Amino acid sequence: MGTTESWDGLSVTEQVLVRRAVDGTSPRGSARHVTAVLRWAGSPEVPRRRNASPAEELARVPELAAATYRLVAGGWLTVRRAPSTAFVQEQEDGPAVTGPELAQVLADPATWLLPRRDRSDLPVLSLRATAEGRRRWEAAAYAPGAPGTVHERELTADEEAVVVCAMEASGWLTGLWGVLAEPPAELVGEELRAFVAADIASLVRLVRAGTIEVLHVAERGAEGTVVPLEELLDALCERELRCDDGDEVEVGFTCILTRSLANALR
């Protein structure tokens, strides 16, 4: 690994943590975020067809702790305590966590993992970029020739609908409130494939560009499974997978903005 004094010298994990610190977000969820970014970076160490399991997220905690130590020492960010509120807000920043307390906080999985039940009793922490850390990030994020984010691209109306779906927690591609059209019941075989291929053309363009990631949710409350680009058409032609009959909600295909390297940077 290179020097931590320059953006290009940071590991992918460190870059993700700095970007989260620029946003001033809680460290919770960082394990999932880093895993998703590494998948899009082509890392052989992360699952290719699914999101990280709870055990895999837990195993990433020591890496996150070590990376944060390096970033604090390198002047990129600080770890701060927020007042007793469930929300991390800049105007409510508390004191920096340092010394032995910092070591204890960073080693605690609860610092990094999204709670799977009510954890309102946990102290609220935030990652905050220092002035120098923000300056270094901006020099890389807005350098001449840096790739634009999805928000800076000119999108068609169909692409905008998919992007809005990806940005909304309740957004679905299929099902009762899905943004994709339901194939007529009489279509089968090549006619069905032709209908679906035309309908998902905008979605495919965004997935190919690394902007959108499609997930399949097999049952209500289950974690989504990543659907690779080369399998999108076949998967969306399976009516049972789409759950287009409306009998089940929160089941079928949804999408999210990807954690590609470009999106993680900006």
Image: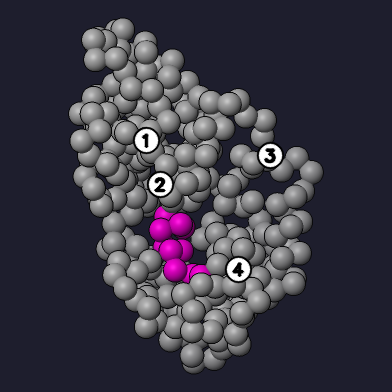
- Count of picture labels: 4
Q: Amino acid at mark 3?
A: Glu
Mark 4 Cα-neighbour bin, 10 Å: few <14, some 14–19, many ≥20: many
Which residue in the structure is indicated by mark 1?
A: 177
Q: Give the spatial CA distance, label 1 vs label 3.
A: 27 Å
Please tell me the numbered disc located at residue 170.
2
Q: Can residue 230 be seen in this snapshot?
A: no
Q: Which residues are magenta?
A: 26-35
Mark 2 Cα-neighbour bin, 10 Å: few <14, some 14–19, many ≥20: few
Spot occupied by residue 142 in the image (x, y as percentages of width and height): 75, 50
Q: Give the spatial CA distance, label 3 vs label 4.
A: 22 Å
Q: Which of the two marks, 1 or 3, is nearer to us in this view? A: 1
Which residue in the structure is indicated by mark 3?
A: 152
Which mark sits nearer the N-terminus, 1 or 3? 3
Q: Secondary structure at mark 1?
A: loop
Which mark sits nearer the N-terminus, 2 or 3? 3
Q: Secondary structure at mark 4?
A: loop
Q: Which of the two marks, 1 or 4, is nearer to us in this view? A: 1
Task: Considering the whole magenta stretch, tell me its main secondary structure.
Answer: helix
Give 215 or 55, whichever is nearer the viewer: 215
Q: Amino acid at mark 1?
A: Trp
Residue name at image x 43 percent, y 63 percent: 29
Q: Amino acid at mark 4?
A: Gly
Does residue 34 show up magenta in the picture? Answer: yes
Which mark sits nearer the N-terminus, 4 or 2? 4
Spot occupied by residue 217 in the image (x, y as percentages of width and height): 28, 42
Q: Secondary structure at mark 2?
A: loop
Decide if residue 153 is on the left or right side of residue 225: right
Spot occupied by residue 139 in the image (x, y as percentages of width and height): 76, 56
Applied colour scheme: one colour
Q: Give the spatial CA distance, label 4 vs label 2.
A: 24 Å
Check contact, mark 4 vs mark 2: CB within 8 A.
no
